[in-house]
Image (cartoon, rainbow, N blue to C red):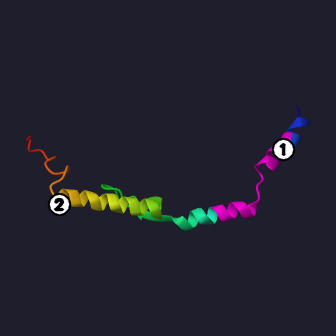
Amino acid sequence: MTRMLPALATLLLAACAADPADQSAATSQIASDMVCTREYPTGTNIPITKCRTREQIETERKVGQDALTQAQRGGPTTGMGGSGN
């Protein structure tokens, strides 16, 4: 068993090795597309870091804008208060 351990360790290290150029190119592409912001959740002064892609940010912006437009027109969000009607 003790003779197999170094061989197994070498095998595992070799299996995990990858071409660093390929990894850094993929990592830099992901990193350049990510935008991280520090946000304060409601009711706390402890910030959290939230990372999103530019596409996610744009989608969230559009969804928020559509919700505001619907509310102004008296869409599905109107009347959901506590009136009981």
**Quadrant of residue 63 in the image?**
bottom left
65 magenta-colored: no
Which residue is label 1 attached to? 11
Q: Which mark is residue 50?
A: none
Is 16 situated left or right of 58 in this image? Answer: right
Residue reaching furthest right? 3
Magenta residues? 8-26
Residue wearing tag 2: 72
Give the answer, above or below, for where 67 lies relative to 13.
below
- Of 22 and 46, nearer the camera is 22
SS of the residue under disc 1: helix
Q: Quadrant of the N terminus?
A: top right
Mark before the other along the chain sequence, 1 or 2: 1
Residue type, mark 1 in image = Leu
Residue placed most toward the observer, 25 or 16: 25
User: Taking 1 as reference, is 84 left or right?
Assistant: left
Badge 2 crowding class, 10 Å Cα cut-off, few under 14, some 14 to 19, many 20 or more, is: few
Quarter of the image holding residue 82? top left
Residue drawn at (92%, 36%) of the image: 3
